């Protein structure tokens, strides 16, 4: 059993969100049922950006609320989709007359509940459109792209979508930008050890002491290969082989590189992973526009990391480079 600094296990989500609200120094507030979080400083007459999903993956999702990022986040219980009433409450809070974009990771429970909330919003006269993030190349073949899971590459999509929502005049234009960012993003992870469920302390999956799994999902969903532990370069090469061939990425491309700690991986390890990933990109003559390293999409104390690549074009680069600020991710100065 894994011990955690919590109080009543049934109050984990409400207490973590209360702590987040206090840490935001007035930037984020609860706007309805537990899990409904929104910015306190939304200008009038803008397209709203609502992200969301299960709690337990912090800073994803609520810590990505802020200027030129998300306007609100609908947060479910640990590893569970937010309920339609939570999503609707956030929708109402972030709607500023120009519609709301739902951008979220592609899991069955999230799809069902966000679709229900969109129908409820439509009954109130709020236009909603959806961009689901399906960046995990290990979770389905390319021909079944829409069956793929969403993982850490969602941050890159949310960053671009947040900038578009802050500057573009219509919901359709924001959807177009966000969908292109999604379609240009690929990710893959490797699990070295399991995270745990805060309410029980039990592991989310089992790996042998000498095993790793390439492509395992955030909750222990199957990857592409379970194998014996190997050196960092060998593991990164296997991950990059899957990533680079999937879009595919080619000589002359320009990318953003995201190295995400799944929960308990040291910065030292991320730097070593970065070294090898960059060597592979340089060998292919793919230029790295920006490198991001840290905890962005976690599964408690899960050991391992994910690598994400966003292929840029001129418009995506402009939106990516716009300054943004949130508790979980900041770029430049506003």
Image: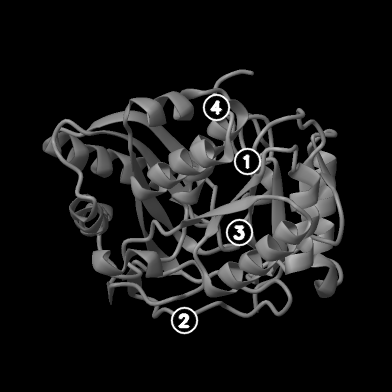
**Residue identified by numbered label 4:** 331
Marks 3 & 4, CB-CB < 8 Å contact: no
Residue 206 badge: 2
Look at the numbered disc 3 and give the secondary structure of its residue. loop
Q: Which residue is mark 3?
A: 57
The quarter of the picture where the C terminus appears is: top right
The location of residue 254, given as percent across then percent down, is 27, 31
Q: CA distance from mark 1 to mark 2?
A: 29 Å
Question: Measuring 45% from the left and 38% from the top, which residue is drawn there?
Answer: 177
Q: Is residue 234 left or right of residue 306?
A: left
From the image, tell me which residue sits under label 1: 328
Q: Is residue 48 above or below residue 13?
A: above
Instruction: Tell me how far mark 3 sits from mark 4, CA to CA.
Output: 21 Å
Give how far apart the Cα atoms at labels 1 and 4 are. Answer: 10 Å
Quarter of the picture containing the N terminus is bottom right
**Mark 1 vs mark 2: in front:** 1
Q: Is residue 134 left or right of residue 264?
A: left
Do callouts 2 and 4 mark residues in contact (Cβ within 8 Å)? no
Q: Is residue 234 above or below residue 2?
A: above
Distance between the alpha carbons at the discs numbered 3 and 1? 11 Å
Residue drawn at point x = 71 percent, y = 46 percent = 72
Q: Nearer the viewer, residue 75 or 223?
A: 75
Q: Earlier in the sequence, mark 3 or mark 4?
A: 3
Say which of 246 and 293 sits in front. 246
Mark 2–mark 3 Cα distance, whole angstroms, equals 19 Å
Which structural element holds mark 4?
A: loop
Report, in whole angstroms, how far the alpha carbon at label 2 lies from the one at label 4: 37 Å
Q: Is residue 197 visible?
A: yes
Q: Nearer the viewer, mark 2 or mark 3?
A: 3
């Amino acid at each position: 059993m894994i011990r955690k600094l919590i109080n009543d296990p049934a109050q984990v989500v409400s207490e973590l969100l209360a702590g987040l609200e206090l840490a935001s120094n007035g930037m984020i507030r609860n706007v309805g049922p537990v899990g409904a979080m929104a910015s306190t400083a939304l200008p009038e007459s803008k397209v709203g950006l609502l992200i969301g999903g299960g709690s337990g993956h912090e800073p994803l999702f609520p810590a990505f609320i802020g200027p030129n990022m998300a306007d609100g986040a609908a947060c479910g219980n640990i590893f569970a989709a937010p309920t339609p009433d939570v999503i609707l409450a956030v929708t109402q809070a972030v709607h500023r007359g120009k519609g709301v974009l739902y951008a979220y990771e592609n899991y069955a429970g999230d799809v069902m509940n966000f679709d229900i909330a969109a129908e409820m919003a439509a009954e109130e006269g709020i236009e909603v459109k959806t961009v689901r993030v399906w960046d995990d190349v290990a979770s389905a073949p390319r021909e079944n792209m829409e069956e793929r899971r969403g993982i850490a590459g969602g941050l890159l999509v949310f960053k671009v979508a947040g900038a578009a929502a802050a500057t573009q005049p219509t919901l359709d234009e924001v959807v177009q930008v966000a969908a292109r960012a999604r379609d240009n993003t690929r990710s893959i992870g490797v699990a070295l050890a399991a995270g745990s469920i805060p309410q029980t302390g039990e592991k989310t999956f089992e790996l042998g002491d000498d095993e790793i799994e390439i492509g395992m999902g955030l909750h222990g969903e199957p990857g592409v290969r379970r194998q014996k532990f190997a050196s960092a370069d060998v593991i990164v090469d296997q991950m990059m082989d899957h990533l680079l061939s999937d879009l595919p990425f080619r000589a002359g491309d320009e990318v953003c590189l995201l190295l995400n700690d799944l929960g308990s991986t040291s910065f030292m390890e991320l730097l070593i992973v970065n070294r090898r990933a960059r060597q592979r990109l340089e060998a292919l003559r793919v230029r790295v526009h920006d490198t991001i390293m840290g905890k962005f999409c976690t599964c408690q104390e899960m050991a391992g990391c994910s690598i994400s690549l966003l292929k840029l074009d001129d418009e995506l680069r402009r939106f990516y480079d716009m300054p943004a600020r949130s508790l979980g991710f900041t770029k430049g100065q506003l």
